[in-house]
Amino acid sequence: MSQASQFSLLKQRRFAPFFWTQFLGAFNDNVFKTALLVILTYDAVSWTSLDPAVLNSLIPGLFILPYVLFSATAGQIAEKVEKGRLARFVKMLEIGIMLVAGIGWMTHTLWLLIASVVGMGVHSTLFGPVKYAYMPQHLKSEELVGGNGVVEMGTFVGILLGQILGAALVLKSNGLLLVAGATMFFAVLGLVASYRIPLSPAPAPELKINPNPFAESVRNIGHARKNRTVFLSMLGNSWFWFYGAMILSQFPLYAKEYLHGDYSVFVMLLTVFSVGVGVGSLLCEKLSGHKVEIGLVPFGSIGLSLFGIDLYFASIGYVRPPVEVEMMGMLAQAGVTRVLFDIAMIGVFGGLFIVPLFALIQTRCEPAHLSRTIGGMNIMNALFMIGAAGVAIVMIKMGFSIPEMFLATAILNAIVALYIFSLVPEFLMRFLAWMLIHTIHRVKTVDVDRIPEEGPAVLVCNHVSYVDAIVIGAASPRPIRFVMDHKIFKMPFMGWLFRTARAIPIAPAKEDQFLMEKAYIDIAQALHEGDLVCIFPEGRLTSTGEMGEFRGGIAKIVERSKVPVIPMALRGLWGSLLTRDPGNLFERTFARGPRSRLALAVGMPVAPEDATPDYLHKQVLALRGDWK
């Protein structure tokens, strides 16, 4: 799917009505909340005797509270009810809430507006599981990353535009009427969009809803923990919201006290961050090669820390103007460009971090439990955001300045990332593979969609370099168990990578009979569990660039496990630095260029009864063509 087709989803009924329904919901949430926060900041006396600072902390907390209390229940409802029908119910609920809020605006009744904040929190809680469980039902696997990117972009743009419009409307002379009318209009518009959402059958219509949300929350999170990769992806997602809450919650004071800017400067910071997240989310599809590429998650995490740290240094090096300035005046200040660039890049790398995590959860989670998993993740997100508020309060009481809070958050992000990646090394391994094929090599894939999306299969390929497994693994939409020579498996560093990928070491019978037999048992077990297994039937690296004969191991494998065999061929890698004979220095450095052109071609599946070594050798040779 090309970059253009990522946006072409917005023209298709299977995606567009859902997108606009969720966009308008996020947008309307923020029109209403921002208008309320602004009016309580600038005109608090006519509304309440409470401290505006208390209200500004209370209102976001009340919005988040339903996520903690009802996300588990919302996840169950999304499993049981057809998603289009549920979306329409949520939009009708939004109209009712905005009606109550309108009465509150017109009568200056604060408690009605506060109740509406909680109601909109319930509205968002109910729609949360629908938002991410809907896409796997209607998008192809290669469209998921692009679809998630568009949704994340839309969400952050909706939040930003809602905040801008809410602040702009409420400060006008007839602002309360304008806000009441606008929020009702956008709620109705969201309902209209929801009626176009196509049928999305419930995955578990017979599910009995547990009336105890707390017990269900514990059960959902416990179920998610059984799939370690999914659970740690949920934790990573929640950590992003912690990081974002720590940074964004400080923007108002940062704009006023450190940049010495007015409200328009605060809006500018939000705009730069939101546009950054949108750009990063959209870049995911291109950088991932249109598949779920979790190698982008460490890349995103590195950027979050690096630019968070640099934001600290940019802030302490910034010279405040003598008087408060508006946005255009701020842009003329020396040093502000670096501040804005850091904030934008935090957004970009945040998008690169979070979109692959959502796609991974959607593809690795059981379809019948996806909505409940998303509900459990929303609970964790809310708890992490509440935790961020608590940590921020502690830091302020300890005397941290806002730039120091940015620095501490960036360093903490690096520590948390290292911890998560140590628990699931697949993230780091995929990152190294992604870096390899985007720096040393440009990898073109030919018919890679012939690798089955599910179920067991054996992949066979020619063996050209020490990084063949990494290149193939990076190009595959699924994890692969590689069978490799025990000597390569024991190589420093590379061996760690292969152990991380659960590679299966094998040795010739004359070297280690036991290890050879154990390898065949492990291969059979992997195929029985539905994994992809890749072998290099030549049994060793080529020393000439030509393919050697295929040994009989493949026949033993398919004799035990009747699974399809997929022939593949690596082209163009011979002579690079990582082959047995890398050629002369001039050729490999200058004539070939620093990034060699490499292709991985995938052939048609071969039935197990036809998968003889000679036949597969001919298939791989034909795929390789004249390339070495």
Image (cartoon, grey):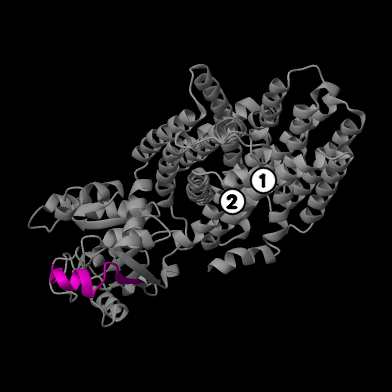
Q: Is residue 482 among the parts visible in the rendering?
A: yes
Rendering quarter of residue 477? bottom left
| Residue drawn 51% across the image and 40% down it | 237
Rendering quarter of residue 374? top right
Which amino acid, mark 1? Leu
Give the percent coordinates (x, y) of residue 577: 19, 64
Q: Which residue is mark 1?
A: 160
User: For this view, does 113 lie left or right of residue 7?
Assistant: right
Which amino acid, mark 2? Val
| Residue drawn 10% across the image and 52% down it | 512
Give the percent coordinates (x, y) of residue 389: 57, 26
Give the percent coordinates (x, y) of residue 609: 33, 72
Against 268, residue 43 (above or below) is: above
| Residue drawn 14% across the image and 56% down it | 507
Secondary structure beneath label 1: helix
Residue 275's tag is 2
User: For this view, does 264 lie left or right of residue 581?
Assistant: right
Rendering quarter of residue 546? bottom left
Closer-to-camera residue (609/442): 442
Q: Does the CB distance between marks 2 and 1 fall below 8 Å?
A: yes
Which residues are drawn in magenta? 581-600
